[in-house]
Image (spheres, helix red, strand yellow):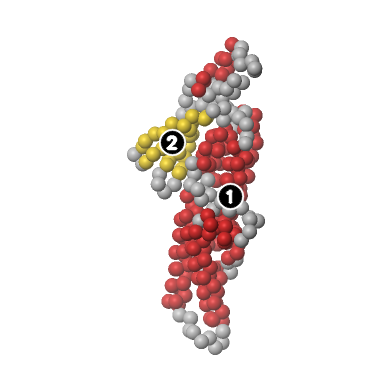
Amino acid sequence: MSDTSQTPSDEDDVLSLLAKTIIIDQNPDANRFRGVGSLQPLEPTSFVDEHGIMNHVHIEPQRSRNGRTLEIWWGPGAEARAAWLLIDRAPPIKHEAWTATQQTLYGTPPHPNHTPAIIALIDRAVLEERRCWQELDTLNSEPTLESIAAVNMQAVLEHVCSLSGIAPGGGDPMLSLEKLHYELSDDLVLLGRYHQRIKALGCESKAEHAVDVVTEANAQRLLNRFKEIWAAIVGKLSPGQLASEMEFYAHQMQWPCR
């Protein structure tokens, strides 16, 4: 049986610990946390384990005028668990790096000494998500017929799969996407069709004896439709962007609780 006794100095040290708090907005469209509020003194018996480490997480549901909120308090040693909860409360469609990060966090034992490793883990996932969105900047900016025609749709498919939680190398990405998120797969199929039509427009406009005359109105219609479909895809992927929020959380972990 382990010795759970503490010296007076240890006990005073534990009693002086404060827990950090972070609030999640749980609205129907997305889950977003607003940041770390004032440090709140907590009853140490609620958070201290037999080794004197504050390693539990306390969740407090609240109500606000904008919708339901969830407040998470954590103390030294509970950083991995709090990070796991933040990812778990996010929308289901999110970058596959966050799923992998969550699995690693689940197996991380609570201890304050693990904080640097947890921060590094979060930072890697932040970079992966942002890199994915940067690769799609051509479509997220104001696209033209020429820029769309030059897009590598296979790369777009792979990035969308990553952003929806599908890791590469697991077989046909479109089949995987269809099984998990069929609406996204339908949108991508439609996007690919319009991409082919836009590419065909470029070929027709260069042909000397094109059968069909490419009209400006037809070209604009295809461009607008392509942009509408892509906007629908982004609308499904955007709520799962966690880079800014988790980067903020990792930054807060670097500050002491007391």
- Give the secondary structure at mark 2: strand
**Which residue is at a point 43% across and 36% down the rendered structure image?**
70
Crowding at mark 1 (Cα within 10 Å: few <14, some 14-19, many 20+): many
> Where is residue 56, by image quadrant?
top right
- Give the secondary structure at mark 1: helix
> Which residue is outermost to the front?
1
**Viewer-proximal residue among 238 and 208:** 238
Crowding at mark 2 (Cα within 10 Å: few <14, some 14-19, many 20+): some
**Above-or-below relation of 210 to 26:** below
Quadrant containing the N terminus is top right
**Which residue is at a point 46% across and 72% down the rendered structure image?**
222
> Where is residue 14, by image quadrant?
top right
**Above-or-below relation of 117 to 216:** above
In the drawing, what numbered circle is on residue 56?
none
Residue 96, horizontal then vertical, whole percent: 58, 49
The earlier-in-sequence mark between 1 and 2 is 2
**Which residue is at a point 62% across and 31% down the rendered structure image?**
109
**Above-or-below relation of 168 to 25:** below
Residue 144, horizontal then vertical, whole percent: 51, 68
Residue 92, horizontal then vertical, whole percent: 50, 48
Q: Can residue 137 be seen from the camera position used here? A: no
> Where is residue 76, by image quadrant?
top right
Quadrant containing the C terminus is top right
Q: Can residue 183 be seen from the camera position used here? A: yes
CA gap, disc 1 and disc 2:
24 Å
**Which residue is at a point 34% across and 39% down the rendered structure image?**
65
> Looking at numbered disc 2 in the image, what kind of residue is underneath it?
Leu
> Which residue is outermost to the top?
8
Q: Which residue is mark 1?
A: 96
Q: Which residue is mark 2?
A: 70
> Looking at numbered disc 1 in the image, what kind of residue is underneath it?
Glu
